[in-house]
Amino acid sequence: MAAIELRDVVKTFPDGTSALDGVSLNVADGEFMVLVGPSGCGKSTILRVVAGLEEMTSGEVLIGGKVANGLPPNERNVAMAFQTYSLYPQLTVYENIAFPLRVSKSFSKREIDQIVRDASRTLGLDDVLQTKPGVLSGGQRQRVAMGRAMVRDPQALLLDEPLSNLDARLRQELRAEIAWLQRCLGTTTLYVTHDQTEAMALGDRVVVLEQGRVQQIATPRDLYRHPANLFVADFIGSPPMEFLPVTVTGDVVELSFAWVRISPQKAARVHGREQFIAGLRPERVRLEDLVGTDHQYARIPRDVPPGVPDYLIRYEKELVGGEINTPLNSRSDYNRRFLERDQEDRYVNSRSLQLFDPATGENLTRDVD
């Protein structure tokens, strides 16, 4: 196993299209790192550059601490799996897994048999070794594809949207399979997906990309709670973070429906400015029986009573000026409380507010409460 490092990697196609614009990241030995972002953001290009299938314009790729620039794919010792399993339908599971070992001509029959059976035991495929792929379940086919990639003992595993062609239920099942396999094998893994839920469920760390640039690299928890900018805040989360224009004076934030006092640390971060975009996660809108008098909470008016049989309740709030309506979501782990106690007030805790620069989109309060 080996670490992977990209240093200021640029990829520009002959027609001038910029696929990667100064991408730098470091995947630790044994880490499961997920690349996520909208279509065309450069996710798959990064995998192809690491694998040696795409020549970069400039920058460096290091695998196991050694510069891999210029090395052909077969000398990089990385394995790649794609959206389709690419199994040979005429071969048994055993032969599919053994195929790369036979092609390499570096192993004896006895060594191949030992390696295949060790992989089969780890992957739970012993009962289907003599079965052909056509009768296997989606999960079993995924494991065969992973086994075939792993028997060469690669330094890293590159997975390019391996679940994107599956229905939602099977995708969820295989997501758990892949996480389990990676933990068992301990292989450094770069995983590409456009599904932010998948990224947050699988990754030790997640890289959010947009237009060929890294927007943020963080653990799923930090990515969700402390987004670096408006793009990350809007892209990560379902439903996404809510945004409201606000004015800040000293330590007072004036929302469209109330005012709330923020901490001295947060006030210091935005000192000297007035206009911001406030971000709020829906689940941070809370039901409270009793609220303190320190003005850390702002009450949300009950314009629309909650009557939706779901955890997502939508309120319509009028901005100052009266013509623009801003929807504000609230989410609770206790759905019945909304339905049974619909006269209870709802509050925004100032500690959960994120303040963004309207011009740059930067989160000015990402590391303070």
Image (cartoon, rainbow, N blue to C red):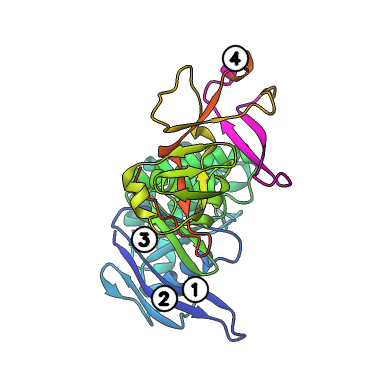
Q: Are marks 1 and 4 in contact (CB under 8 Å)?
A: no
Dot 3, crowdedness within 10 Å: few (<14), some or many (≥20)? many
Nearer to the camera, 148 or 222: 222
Q: Mark 1 or mark 4: name the one nearer the start of the chain.
A: 1
Disc 1 secondary structure class? strand
Amino acid type assigned to the residue bearing label 3 in the image: Ala
Q: Mark 4 or mark 3: name the one nearer the start of the chain.
A: 3
Tag in front: 2 or 3 = 2
Query: Please, is residue 170 above or below residue 67 in the view?
Result: above
Instruction: Decide whether residue 72 is among the magenta residues.
Output: no
- In the orientation shown, which residue stands out farthest toward the top? 340
Tag in front: 3 or 1 = 1
Mark seen at residue 156: 3
Mark seen at residue 20: 1
| Disc 2/disc 1 C-alpha distance (Å) | 7 Å
The residue that disc 4 covers is 341
| Disc 4/disc 3 C-alpha distance (Å) | 53 Å
Tag in front: 1 or 4 = 4
Q: Mark 3 or mark 1: name the one nearer the start of the chain.
A: 1
Q: Mark 2 or mark 1: name the one nearer the start of the chain.
A: 2
**Could you tell whether 206 is left or right of 39 in the image?**
left
| Disc 2/disc 3 C-alpha distance (Å) | 19 Å
Task: Point out the image quarter for the N terminus.
Answer: bottom left
The residue that disc 2 covers is 9
Dot 1, crowdedness within 10 Å: few (<14), some or many (≥20)? many
Dot 2, crowdedness within 10 Å: few (<14), some or many (≥20)? many
State the image quarter where residue 313 is shown: top right
Q: Are marks 2 and 1 in contact (CB under 8 Å)?
A: yes
Q: Are marks 4 and 3 in contact (CB under 8 Å)?
A: no
Task: Point out the image quarter for the C terminus.
Answer: top left
Q: Which residues are magenta?
A: 310-337
